[in-house]
Amino acid sequence: YLENYYNLAKDAKQFARRKDSSPVVKNKIQEMQKFLGLKVTGKLDSDTLQVMHKPRCGVPDIREFRTFPGMPKWRKTHLTYRIVNYTLDLPRDAVDSAIEKALKVWEEVTPLTFSRIYEGEADIMITFAVRRTNLFLVAAQEFGHSLGLEHSKNPEALMYPVYNSSTDLARFRLSQDDVTGIQSLYVSSEPFGSVWEVYALTEASHSS
């Protein structure tokens, strides 16, 4: 978990298996606890382990958009998307509907519009891997990343890395944190590249 989402070096991970009190590992645990809004103890206590075992986004919490100049932003306001393949766990119309709704939450608060294409290269290429939590929540957050947002430290935000299973999907609205973040990107910032691949249902690793 720390290696995947908090840049814990592999050699530090091996050391941690021999000595739990490794200062490197302790610092990473503290970093994780602070980011996720947990009590900062530097230990894998019950509250921390409980959060670590919840379904979450596969994108690291500690990262930078180093390949993009400045704050990332699309060069255009109309974007295309393509569903490259489907999951066998859901009917195709349910997948189509969830993807449309996930894009709609961002469309409603930005100048962006989205349309689907069925062949060729789209701006956003959607691929399904392993099923896990609610498709709408997963897809909406992945689209947030594709539009330039990183993870939020606000547990109420869609862009918080751990999925909230108690979310009322019928009344879902972006939090003010999400809205502020996406609108800040589409006021004045540098653009970025032409294609973003979204793996909407990629299984996240929860090993420590």
Image (spheres, rainbow, N blue to C red):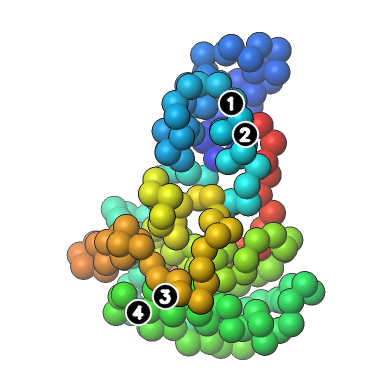
Residue shown at 30%/75% (left/top)?
A: 110
- Per the model, the C-alpha gap separating discs 2 and 4 is 36 Å
Question: Could you say whether the residue bearing mark 1 is in a helix, strand or loop?
Answer: loop
Q: Callout 1: 10 Å neighbours few (<14), some, many (20+)?
A: few
| Residue 108: mark in rendering | 4
The reply to whether residue 71 is visible in this rendering is yes
Contact between labelled residues 1 and 2, with CB atoms less than 8 Å apart:
yes
Pointer 2 local density, CA inside 10 Å: few below 14, some 14–19, many at least 20? few
Look at the image and tell me in which quarter the C terminus lies: top right
Return the x and y of residue 128 as percentages of the image width and height.
69, 68
Q: Which mark is residue 208?
A: none
Q: Is residue 167 left or right of residue 86?
A: left
Q: Are marks 4 and 1 in contact (CB under 8 Å)?
A: no
Q: Badge 3 local density, few (<14 within 10 Å), some, or many (20+)?
A: some
What residue did someone put label 1 on?
45
Residue shown at 44% from the left, 26% from the top: 40
Q: Earlier in the sequence, mark 4 or mark 1?
A: 1
Amino acid bearing label 2: Leu
Three-letter amino acid code at the position of disc 1: Asp
Which marked residue is nearer to the observer: mark 2 or mark 4?
A: 2
User: How much space separates mark 2 and mark 3, taking CA atoms?
Assistant: 31 Å
**Residue at numbered disc 2:** 49
Discs 4/1, front: 1
Identify the disc placed on residue 105: 3
Query: Looking at the image, do the residues carrying marks 4 and 3 touch, with CB atoms under 8 Å apart?
Result: yes
> Tag 4, which secondary structure?
loop
Secondary structure beneath label 2? helix
